[in-house]
Each structure stands twice: as C-alpha cells, then as structure tokens.
Amino acid sequence: MTLAQAESLLTDRDTIPQAEPLARRAIHVSGYEREGRDFYATPAWVTEALLKHVMFRGPIWEPCCGDGAMSSVLADKGYDVVSTDLVDRGFGTAGVDFLACRAVPGGCRSIVTNPPYGDTGSQKGQSRSPMAMLGFLRHAMALTDSVQGQLALLVRLQWIAGKRAADTLSAGPFSAVIVLTHRIRWFDMAERTNAAQHHHAWVVFDHRHPKGQPPALLYV
C-alpha cells in the first residue's frame, strides 16, 4: 500500500461524545504490564482457526496490523492483504486511523482484525471497553457494507452476551460465531507464563448473508 493510498483513507473524524471513564476495579490482574495502546500480537493458530471455517472474498484489509502476526497468516493462506495501523510497529503502513477512514482501501472486500480495546479501560483517556468495541464494530460494518463485503473480529466470548452487543449483532448480517475452545495466551514468559483467563471467539459478518438466516455456531 502506497503512502498516497493510505492518505486517501484519512478524513476528519466525526465528533462522537465520549463518556467519562469510570474508576473500576479490574476483574483479573495478570501480573504483566499492559502494552501501549493495548497491542497484543495474535497467535497464528487463532487466525488459522478462523480460516478453517470462512473463505473471504477479494483482498483483505487488516487495519490494526501491529507487527503483522495476523496479516502474515492471511498472506500465507493465499490472500492479498492490505496492512495498516495507527502506530508504527515495523509492519504495514503506519499512521492510518481506522475510525477516521471513510472507505476501505481500493479493491478490498473484507476486514479481518483483532480490535485494540482495553480489558479494564484502565489506560488514561481510553474509552470503556464494551462501548469502544461497539463503535469499532459499527464503523467496520458500515465500511464493509459499502462493498457488500465480509468482516471478522476477534472478541471476548462474554462480550457477545452484553445487551448492547446483542442488539448490534442481531441487527447486522451476522453469519457466524466461531468459539475458540482453547484460551489465548497473549504472553510467553516460559515457566512464568500465567494460565489464560478468558475465552475468545470470532464474530463474522457477511453482507451477502441471507436475511433472517441465523448465524452458524462453530467451535474450534
């Protein structure tokens, strides 16, 4: 992706009122320092689990590419991938704010990513996690709708059960939820690595999904 193409994606961002972050106690403390801007590289098996059940149309946009962990798996499976991120982590095109983009990169028909949102909203200035995810989801759905494309987001399994999330998911072209039966370990510190605490799932949308047809429930 050229710098000119990346710059063409950027526009003035709409002003969205943000609720003041509440002081909250974390449900789980991992013992590790949080990564800046909630960057955690996605293990390869997580993306491979998605691709076992979903075939994507056209080139894929990975808008939170980080160090390229997910993009590399997609490319290895034969997909053309456009990789961007707000932060420069040495991979893809940096400086692209996904939430400020009004269109997908030219030719892309799908978005696949692990959205960067905090588990506890503990970062200074960070939006509350559930609402941040909903905003990300709604924006991604609008972008993929414009090309009648597909969308896959990696989320915490319990997030799906929230009322606001359920309403948004039900209103969209929700085609599948792929539950990961193995918990993701985001850190590898040898014998000091703590047991993973949360289950995750892929939520998949397809703007060609027949209206009224319920999403498939799959396990990997």
Image (cartoon, grey):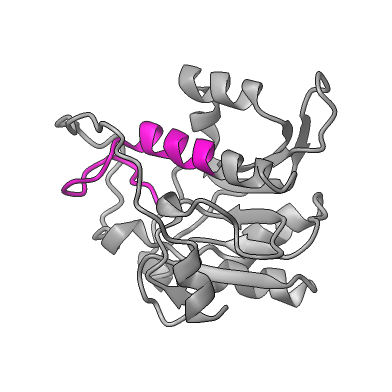
Residue under the image location 49 percent in, 77 percent down: 4
| Residue 170, above or below 100 | above
Q: What percent of the width, then of the height, locates residue 202? A: 64, 44
Left of 209 or right of it: where is 182? left
| Residue 70, above or below 124 | below
Q: Is residue 92 visible?
A: no
Q: Nearer the viewer, residue 46 or 135?
A: 135
Q: Is residue 135 magenta?
A: yes
Q: What percent of the width, then of the height, locates residue 35? A: 29, 62
| Residue 182, above or below 170 | below
Report the number of numbered marks. 0
Dividing the picture into quadrants, the one containing residue 14 is top left
Q: Nearer the viewer, residue 215 or 95?
A: 95
Q: What percent of the width, then of the height, locates residue 78? A: 80, 74
Residue under the image location 25 percent in, 37 percent down: 26
Residue under the image location 63 percent in, 21 percent down: 171
| Residue 171, above or below 100 | above
Q: Which span of residues is magenta-colored? A: 116-139
Q: What percent of the width, then of the height, locates residue 69? A: 55, 71
Residue under the image location 39 percent in, 77 percent down: 89
Left of 163 or right of it: where is 216? right
Dividing the picture into quadrants, the one containing residue 108 is bottom right
Q: Quadrant of the N terminus?
A: bottom right
Q: Is residue 90 visible?
A: yes
Dividing the picture into quadrants, the one containing residue 209 is top right
Q: Is residue 198 magenta?
A: no
